[in-house]
């Protein structure tokens, strides 16, 4: 399993990556951040971004409309697109306690959502 810092550095090699973080979505705590000083999170506020990310993934996993209806089905990722950015949130599946998410923030004009999604999935799998 690669270290958190190494995983986040690799996330920043995704074309268009602005920032990346690993978040405990049960507490909203950030376990690691990568990106420029002003770009680690939207509005340069990593704590607010972590809490927002935790709220989004918690809602997706707990809301009946998105909760798995088929046995073995799980939320793979949540993608939020704005006019300027893509926000990819991917749960990190672990054998013991799956409460971490990998969050990658991409510039929409520079990034490729399909490629970024595949890379984020691979990084999250490596962390597990």
Image: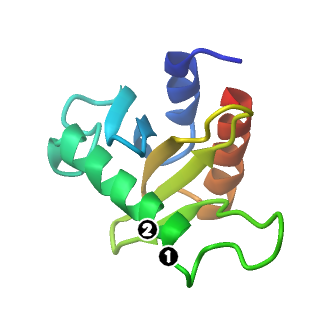
Disc number for residue 63: 1
The alpha-carbon separation of the residues under discs 1 and 2 comes to: 6 Å
- Quadrant hosting residue 82: bottom left
Left/right placement of residue 93 relative to residue 111 reads right
Q: Are marks 1 and 2 in contact (CB under 8 Å)?
A: yes
Q: Is residue 116 left or right of residue 17?
A: right
Q: Secondary structure at mark 2?
A: helix
Q: Residue tagged by mark 2?
A: 59
Tell me residue 115's x, y (percent): 68, 55
Is any part of residue 86 visible from this angle?
Answer: no
Relative to 8, 83 lies left or right: left
Choose between 3 and 19: the one closer to the eye.
Answer: 3
User: Residue 101's spot in the image, x, y percent?
Assistant: 51, 44
Numbered circle sitting on residue 94: none
Q: Residue at x 46, y 46 (%)?
A: 103
Seen in the picture, residue 4 relative to 60 is either above or below; the reply is above
Residue that protrudes farthest toward the bottom in the picture = 65
* Front residue (pair 105, 22): 22
Residue farthest right in this picture? 71
Residue ID at (65%, 38%): 124
């Amino acid at each position: 399993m690669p270290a958190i810092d190494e995983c986040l550095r690799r996330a920043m090699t995704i074309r268009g990556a602005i920032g990346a973080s690993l978040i405990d979505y049960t507490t909203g705590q950030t376990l690691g951040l990568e990106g420029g000083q002003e770009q680690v999170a939207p509005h340069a506020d990593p704590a607010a971004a972590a809490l927002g990310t935790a709220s989004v993934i918690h809602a997706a996993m707990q809301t009946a409309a998105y909760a798995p209806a088929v046995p073995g089905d799980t939320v793979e990722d949540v993608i939020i697109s704005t006019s300027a950015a893509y926000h990819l949130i991917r749960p990190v599946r672990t054998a013991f306690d799956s409460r971490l998410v990998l969050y990658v923030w991409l510039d929409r004009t520079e990034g490729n959502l399909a490629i970024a999604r595949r890379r984020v999935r691979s990084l999250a799998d490596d962390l597990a």
